[in-house]
Amino acid sequence: MFRRSALASAVALVAASACSGAPEPARFVPAQFESAARRASASPIRHVVVVIQENRSFDDLFARFPGATGARRGKRSDGRTVALKEVTLIGSDITHTHGSFETEYDGGKLDGFDKVLYGADQTGTYPYQYVDPALIAEYWTLAREYVLADHMFQTQGSGSYTAHQDLIAGGTAISSTESVIDDPSALPWGCDAPPGTVTSLIDSSGVEYPGAGPFPCFTRATLRDLLDAKHVSWRYYTPNEPGGGDIWNAFDSVQQVREGPQWTKNVSTPETNVLADAEKGRLPDVAWVVPDYWNSDHLGNKHDTGPSWVAGVVNAIGQSRAWNSTAIVVVWDDWGGLYDNVKPPQIRYDGLGFRVPCLIVSPYARKGYVDHTQYEFGSILRFIEDNWSLGRLGTTDATANSIADAFDFTQPPRAFVPLHARYSRASLLRQGHSDEPVDRQ
């Protein structure tokens, strides 16, 4: 839960705002639900936007950020160390399954990063890298101005499919002793998958069973259930893909959404709709934003426009009426096989995975704060649950630390300063769409 002082200050600020007669930010929520949703908010935050980028370890983007737990060298499997090499944002993909996680983790020694696959060969020193900060200036600016969480761990040591499920459900368990791990056997990943598609499992003893899991269309509870129960609005912004119905998004694996009216009402395509919704006062209470492949930071992608895409989303919200009541969480879904120097605590049989970058942007975010609190994806869910008194899903949200430490609700909301982006919003909109899945692993 929020700390008592922060919560009390938040209540006082809300009351002060009401007495001042300041206009409420416009919100995309039916009129009959609006007052109930506002009463349920335990802080000045009335919108949480989770922006999901792809496949980067913390060290890959922030190894040299001042005050963060970064690295200059990494351990190799032969006992030697190697200096991290400065690179561009454009690179080649590395295998990043649960098996490669175990290889790199190597019982906690973190010396197997040179042994995973890079195409058909072992990676050698390729994973030992960091991106030139000048090429990701948008991310470093956000870190300097707001909060950089340097101990955000991927919930599961696995790939993108389960990571995106963790960001809406806090876990992928199908029983008390088994969880889905890695990717389904065919695209798209969800209820739209072709017949015969299977998933893989990991059991509570850590044994993996490739292809032994069910079809990837589940009835598990997600944050959507808690939000709907309290009439808190939500929307999932995601790219279009070839084939019309083959839209890649986490809710494609949630049968209640995929086969119900929310598939067209709450799933919004293309993902650029978030820009217009912010500007027109239609931002929902809770939103997830998935980029087009070209803007995703994914290794193997020949575009370096991800930082500018994120800056465009932040600018659209920052320059809207919703800014004073919004928290934006920018998080990368998995580590992409890249080196990271912090040993992930093994608190469950399937995780935690390696660190991923996380930026927390809000007028109430601490300024220039490196947050060393141990977080995982359930930490984001927990913050949302606490903010609207939603209760718990009972997955990782029940045990993870909330990201509430990133905020100071005793401070007045800071004015937004627009971010400079390397690529303009207009140029990103002109580039069109890649017609590629956001990820394949």
Image (spheres, rainbow, N blue to C red):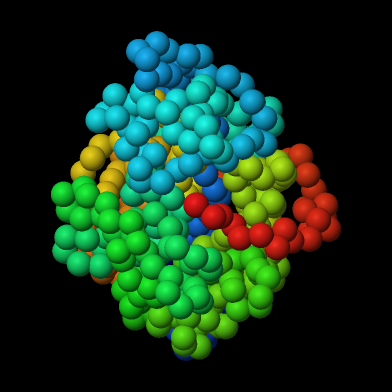
Relative to 400, residue 139 above or below = above
Question: Count of labels shown?
Answer: 0
290 on left or right of 241: left
359 on left or right of 201: right
Tell which of 345 and 284 is nearer to you: 345
Relative to 164, residue 340 above or below = above
* Camera sees residue 249: no
- The answer to which quarter of the image holds residue 238 is bottom right
Tell which of 253 and 428 is nearer to you: 253
Quadrant of the image for the N terminus? bottom left
Q: Position of residue 136 (x, y in %)?
A: 65, 34
188 on left or right of 198: right
Q: Position of residue 67 (x, y in %)?
A: 45, 23
Q: Residue at x 67, y 30 (%)?
A: 88
Q: Residue at x 22, y 64 (%)?
A: 394
Q: Residue at x 47, y 49 (%)?
A: 333
* Camera sees residue 157: yes
380 on left or right of 241: left
Residue lying at the far top in this picture: please name it. Answer: 80
Residue lying at the far front in this picture: please name it. Answer: 120
Q: Position of residue 119 (x, y in %)?
A: 56, 38
Q: Position of residue 437 (x, y in %)?
A: 61, 60
Q: Residue at x 59, y 74 (%)?
A: 246
